[in-house]
Amino acid sequence: MLKNPEKTKNDIVNWIREYFAANGPECSVVVGVSGGKDSSVTAALCKEALGKDRVVGVLMPDGVQSDIADSQEIVKLLDIPNITVNIHAGAVGLSEAIESELKKGSIAGTTGLSRDLKISMPPRLRMSTLYAVAQSLPKGGRVVNTCNRSEDYIGYSTKYGDAAGDFSPLANLLVHEVIQMGEVLGLPERLTRKTPSDGLSGMSDEDKIGFTYAVLDHYILTGECEDEKTREKIDRMHRLNLHKLQLMPAFKPEVQ
């Protein structure tokens, strides 16, 4: 747990201000608003840092989103400019186009898109949407990454999807610490403690990964995990997904 969540909140707010002072003094924040704790806390932090008029919320349902009211509630509560872009037609059209070409068999061994690949398509389209909105703003925008440390540790994000962004206020906060931020910011508990899900697979995050965030957070902080199989799974996920956290490797030729 954060020893002083109020101070941490203030430190993040100041960090956001410093980022924009150096990387776009007149730019706005563009944040994808899912209605969950991460995007809600991120949007609230950015509003406190820059003011409500410089935070643009983007709601991106994929067809019918059962909890879209949560996204609408947070942008109304924060009183920030917002836009809704339904990505369903784009996601379906892109998936069908790629799958159709793959099935032509011009690349050996390809038969179409796997279930996981289809699940990854909407997050990547959402990130493209956020950058399109940012580039369309009169004074420009910076896309905020809303991932937290717990998700990043096990790679529970989509590369070049929700794992992307220009700056990341929550990257060093664990799930339970993000919840603390929500409490300090006065956000509705039903949003900050909402059962997290990717909104794509039909499963909660914890059901999908096979362990709770409480277990994960404890392991990250202490290195302790009572269940050996769970520990091995967390270690394996962390190892296999490190590439999502590292800068793209670049070859450096010898200077002649």
Image: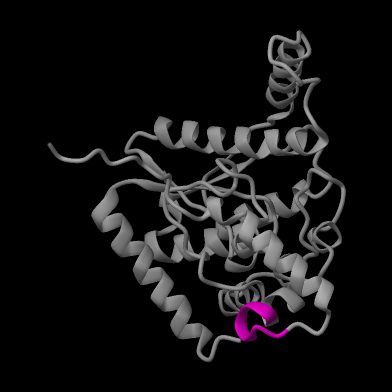
Residue at the image point whose x is 87% and y is 47% from the top: 202
Vertical order, 242 against 117 (above or below): below
Residue at the image point whose x is 62% and y is 32% from the top: 125
Q: Quadrant of the C terminus?
A: top left
In front of the other: 18 or 152: 152
In front of the other: 139 or 198: 198
Q: Is residue 12 visible?
A: yes
Q: Quadrant of the N terminus?
A: bottom right
Q: Quadrant of residue 220?
A: bottom right
Q: Predominant secondary structure in magenta?
A: helix
In front of the other: 139 or 124: 124
Toward the left, the furthest residue is: 256
Vertical order, 24 against 12 (above or below): above
Would residue 253 be counted in the magenta stretch? no
Q: Which residues are magenta?
A: 219-224
Q: How is the image coloured?
A: one colour
- Residue 184 locus on image (x, y percent): 57, 79
Would residue 222 be counted in the magenta stretch? yes
- Residue 146 locus on image (x, y percent): 56, 56
- Residue 227 locus on image (x, y percent): 83, 80
In front of the other: 122 or 129: 122
Toward the bottom, the furthest residue is: 3
Vertical order, 7 against 196 (above or below): below
In this rendering, position of residue 35 left or right of residue 45: right
Q: Quadrant of residue 155?
A: bottom right
Residue at the image point whose x is 80% and y is 42% from the top: 65
Q: Quadrant of residue 105?
A: top right
